[in-house]
Amino acid sequence: MAIVFRELPWYAQALVYLLLLVAIVAVGEFAPVPYVSVQPIRQQLESAKADAKAMQDEVARLRDYERRHAQFRTEMEALERQLATLQAIVPEEKEVDDFIRILQGAAAASNVAIRRLEAKALVPKEYYNEAPFEVEMDGPYFAVLDFFTRLGRIPRIINVGDLSFKGIDETRGKKYPLRPGTTVTGSVVATTFFTKGAEPPPPVPQPGKQPAKQPAKR
């Protein structure tokens, strides 16, 4: 005949609860439970956090470097454009052929004839050199004015001085024929500039002084 637990006396129910508690404690005490230490896992977690922080710092540094590199590249491009502009205004080399083409192009566009072009001695300055050219030309008066105007619009610096012009009535007997419409003829000194250092001139010996002897070559 089945016995209902609730129908047992209270002291019997208490005894059953006590026996169950003892059984549970015994199982927990004697059953093989694997021991797991949390210290290594904690150390691995801290190491992973440190690595993640280092990687974040490296990414931030690389992003800053990328930003500064882009800024530096922009500044370099601006300086290169500025240098190209300055070299067009005052070239590094003398560039005589290019200078002659500039003069001939401006003269042809203005209907002015260049009869003679003679290079003069260089004039070295502290930071640049002057390269003067004597230019003999003729043409209509307003065409000559237009020629000078065109030279003033060219990026390369060209100074024009020592102007000497006369009417064609004062220049009879020229060895070349003048074109129709020519009213003036004369010469100017057109000076261009370049930055490359010229060879220093040899020293001029002083009167009464012997030039210094060069050491004998071995």
Image: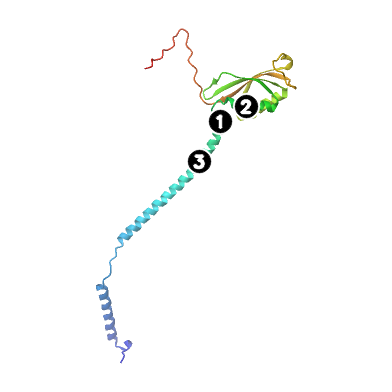
Is 27 located above or below residue 96 in the figure? below
Q: Amino acid at mark 1?
A: Gln
Quick check: 8 above or below 141?
A: below
Q: Nearer the viewer, mark 2 or mark 1?
A: 2
Cα separation, mark 1 vs mark 3, equals: 21 Å
Mark 2 residue type = Arg
Q: CA distance from mark 2 to mark 3?
A: 35 Å
Instruction: Return the residue at label 2.
Output: 101
**Label for residue 73?**
3
- Residue 116 at what x, y percent from top left? 64, 19
Tell me the kind of residue under disc 3.
Answer: Arg
Local packing at callout 2 (Cα closer than 10 Å; few below 14, some 14-19, many 20+) is few
Give the image location of residue 69, x and y in percent. Answer: 48, 43
**Rendered location of residue 117, percent (x, y):** 63, 20
Looking at the image, which residue is at 53% across and 36% down? 80
Where's residue 32, x and y in %? 26, 71
Which of 13 and 3 lies nearest the eye of the viewer? 3
Q: Which residue ends up furthest to the top in the rendered image?
A: 208
Q: Which residue is mark 1?
A: 87
* CB-based contact (under 8 Å), mark 2 and mark 3: no
Tag 2, which secondary structure?
helix
